[in-house]
Image (tube, grey):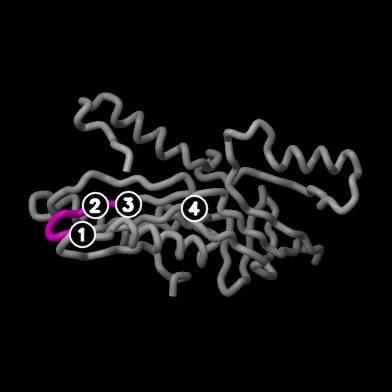
């Protein structure tokens, strides 16, 4: 049941088709867990271990290490994944949905999820999730949860606000919007990439991260 898978892992004696299997697994998890921000994976071939990180901008892969030569690193991965908080394995703390029901926090307002209307399939992209929600007074709203393409000159919320001001009919009324916050910082797929670059920029050329 992909709605319950936390961290996909593959154990093999060869390297054939690894990344394809993980990519498929990540897509299934995103499709069945609408509150997923990213997906972690563990790959073990013989005694070689690698970690994988999938988000809406692509995939990051750690360098391989030998579990026999680096047992502490192996234990850190196993124990860390076993006891880590939900948000560190990619679960959005502002959204909780089980069997199409749950709750969502928008700023300081809590909404009840009445129905999971639609989840856009795929791994890379906006990862749009549409929900039917109600507030504490029973008013019903359509809530759209999606990643923002930072390269666009005008964002969807800006366009919708302008259309509302023009009072164009058959256009949804924008009630509120917010950027998901993690530890007080707006969530972005750029955050982890910027952190990796900051931590590795002093390394020699042969130790720099490479594109997968």
Quote the CA–CA distance across marks 2 and 1: 7 Å
Quote the CA–CA distance across marks 4 and 1: 24 Å
Helix or strand or loop: what does disc 4 sit on? Answer: loop
Residue 63 against residue 145 in the figure, above or below: above
Q: Which residue is mark 3?
A: 52
Is 48 displayed left or right of 81 in the figure? left
User: In the rendering, which numbered label is found on residue 44?
Assistant: 1
Residues under numbered marks 3 and 4 in contact, where contact means CB atoms less than 8 Å apart: no
* Position of residue 43 measured from the top left corner of the image (x, y, whole percent): 25, 58
On whether residue 49 falls in the magenta region, the answer is yes
Is 187 displayed left or right of 12 in the figure? right
Q: Main secondary structure of the magenta part?
A: strand
- How many numbered marks does the figure carry? 4
**Mark 4 nearby-residue class (10 Å; few <14, some 14–19, many ≥20):** many
Residue 197 against residue 51 in the figure, above or below: above
Instruction: Choose between 99 and 154: the one closer to the eye.
Output: 154
Question: Which image quarter holds the C terminus?
Answer: top left
* Residue at 70% in and 46% down: 177
Q: Which residues are magenta?
A: 45-51
* Residue at 51% in and 41% down: 188
Q: Which residue is mark 2?
A: 50
Quarter of the view holding residue 154: top right
């Amino acid at each position: 049941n992909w709605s319950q898978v936390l961290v996909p892992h593959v154990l093999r004696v060869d390297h054939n088709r690894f990344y394809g299997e993980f990519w498929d697994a990540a897509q299934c998890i995103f499709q069945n867990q609408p509150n997923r921000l990213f997906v972690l994976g563990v790959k073990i071939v013989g005694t070689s271990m690698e970690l994988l990180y999938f988000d809406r901008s692509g995939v990051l892969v750690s360098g391989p290490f030998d579990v026999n030569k680096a047992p502490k690193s192996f234990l850190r991965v196993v124990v860390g994944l076993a006891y880590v908080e939900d948000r560190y394995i990619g679960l959005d703390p502002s959204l909780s949905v089980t069997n199409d029901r749950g709750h969502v926090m928008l700023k300081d307002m809590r909404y009840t999820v009445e129905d999971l209307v639609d989840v856009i399939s795929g791994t890379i992209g906006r990862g749009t999730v549409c929900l039917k929600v109600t507030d504490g007074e029973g008013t019903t709203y359509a809530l759209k949860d999606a990643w923002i393409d930072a390269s666009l000159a005008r964002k969807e919320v800006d366009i919708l606000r302008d259309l509302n001001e023009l009072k164009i009919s058959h256009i949804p009324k924008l009630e509120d919007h917010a950027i998901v916050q993690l530890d007080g910082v707006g969530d972005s797929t750029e955050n982890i990439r910027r952190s990796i670059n900051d931590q590795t920029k002093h390394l020699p050329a042969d130790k720099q991260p490479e594109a997968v």
